[in-house]
Image (cartoon, rainbow, N blue to C red):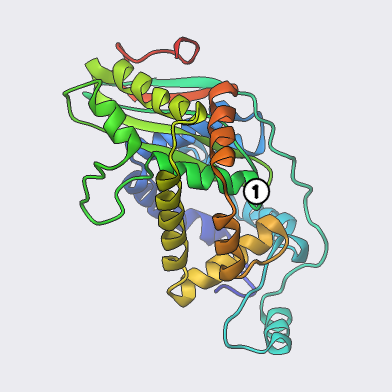
């Protein structure tokens, strides 16, 4: 926690080398593709990178930091949550130590989805590719349907070093190539928008086949290719994932704060579980259908000689 920060000129200059070191260590192929995916998908707001571009590292001054805090760290844009503390005491601590400005702060622009494509050609023998359509904002019933759909298709291994062979995406793509690959459903929900699709990693020569097979699995779900048993399993996985995220105080605080900021209210674990149970086969098919018919966004990185363009998928 930082209280009453002064933003001296030494702050930005001393942090430059540290930032560059941390920045370079955290940027992976997947991070690069997800960043490019959002840049291609949106006209504003969500198109902005989470990371400071290299050319701006030495140009961010203490005045910029101070202005950003003044515009964004305001009472209407923040959530103060606590566990094991009386509400009045928590409120007093916030008012006394956090030095939060009152008011709405800078007006945020609503995210505008446009669709598009970014290709990052390189020498890597592996191709990372993501194909998405616009989905739904966090807190909506549609967003919950996309979360269940992610589990139906396969969200990645549920145990450490698991093979995830039961995933519908894994099973479908395995029929299209004998080369090593990985595939999972991609799902991201924000306060006013969302993205849903597939993320593939494949050998360069097999990229087109892997992507096509993954998209075919989503279409199969849209056409009704999901059983009641599939839905029950997916719901159980989503509920387990959700409840395990609340097992620590930090996880529960994060969930409370995230809900308060994105949805304007807090739903108890029991309420969330009930909402998950209410998702139907029709909801899943509709969510998959929205992806299939929606305007696509695609981002790819690696040796792209066999990777299709977004208008070819």
Question: Quick one: 96 or 300, which is closer to the camera?
Answer: 300
Q: Where is the C terminus found, in terms of image quarters?
A: top left
Question: Quick one: 200 or 14, which is closer to the camera?
Answer: 200
Against 255, is 221 above or below?
above
- Return the x and y of residue 70 as percentages of the image width and height: 73, 59
- Return the x and y of residue 5 as percentages of the image width and height: 61, 70
Question: Quick one: 169 or 47, which is closer to the camera?
Answer: 169
Whether residue 58 is visible, yes or no, is no
On the rendered structure, is 114 left or right of 57? right
On the rendered structure, is 260 left or right of 105? left
Whether residue 285 is visible, yes or no, is yes
Which image quarter: residue 172?
Answer: top left
Residue visible at 45% across and 39% down in the picture: 186
Q: Where is the N terminus found, in terms of image quarters?
A: bottom right
**Residue that lies at the very extreme toward the front in this rendered image:** 228
Residue visible at 69% across and 64% down in the picture: 78
Against 304, is 57 above or below?
below
Against 183, is 156 above or below?
below
On the rendered structure, is 263 left or right of 147? right
The residue wearing badge 1 is 141
Task: Count how many numbered circles sit on residues in the image.
Answer: 1
- Return the x and y of residue 212 as percentages of the image width and height: 37, 19
Secondary element type, mark 1: helix
Residue visible at 59% across and 50% down in the picture: 61
Question: Quick one: 176 or 307, which is closer to the camera?
Answer: 176
Which image quarter: residue 267?
Answer: bottom right
**Residue that lies at the very extreme toward the right in this rendered image:** 103
């Amino acid at each position: 926690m930082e209280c009453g920060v002064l933003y001296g000129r030494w702050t930005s200059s001393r942090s430059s080398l540290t930032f560059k070191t941390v920045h370079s260590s955290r940027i992976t192929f997947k991070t690069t593709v997800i960043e490019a995916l959002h840049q291609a998908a949106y006209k504003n707001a969500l198109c902005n990178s989470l990371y400071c571009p290299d050319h701006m590292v030495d140009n961010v001054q203490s005045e910029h930091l101070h202005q950003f805090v003044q515009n964004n760290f305001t009472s209407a844009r923040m959530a103060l949550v606590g566990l094991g503390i009386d509400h009045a005491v928590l409120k007093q601590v916030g008012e006394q130590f956090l030095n939060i400005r009152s008011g709405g702060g800078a007006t945020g622009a609503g995210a505008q989805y446009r669709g598009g494509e970014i290709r990052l050609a390189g020498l890597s023998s592996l191709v990372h590719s993501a194909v998405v359509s616009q989905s739904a904002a966090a807190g909506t019933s549609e967003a919950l349907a996309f979360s269940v759909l992610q589990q139906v298709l396969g969200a990645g291994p549920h145990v450490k070093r698991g093979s995830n062979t039961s995933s519908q995406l894994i099973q479908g793509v395995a029929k299209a190539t004998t080369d090593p690959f990985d595939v999972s459903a991609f799902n991201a929900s924000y306060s006013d928008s969302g993205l849903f699709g597939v993320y593939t990693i494949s050998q360069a020569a097999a990229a087109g086949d892997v992507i096509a097979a993954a998209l075919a699995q989503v279409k199969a779900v849209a056409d009704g290719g999901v059983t009641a048993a599939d839905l029950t399993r997916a719901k159980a996985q989503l509920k387990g994932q959700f409840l395990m995220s609340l097992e620590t105080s930090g996880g529960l605080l994060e969930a409370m704060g995230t809900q308060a900021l994105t949805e304007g209210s807090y739903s108890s674990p029991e309420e969330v579980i009930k909402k998950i149970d209410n998702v139907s086969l029709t909801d899943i098919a509709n969510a998959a259908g929205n992806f299939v018919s929606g305007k696509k966004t695609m981002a790819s990185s690696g040796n792209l000689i066999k990777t299709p363009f977004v208008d070819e998928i």
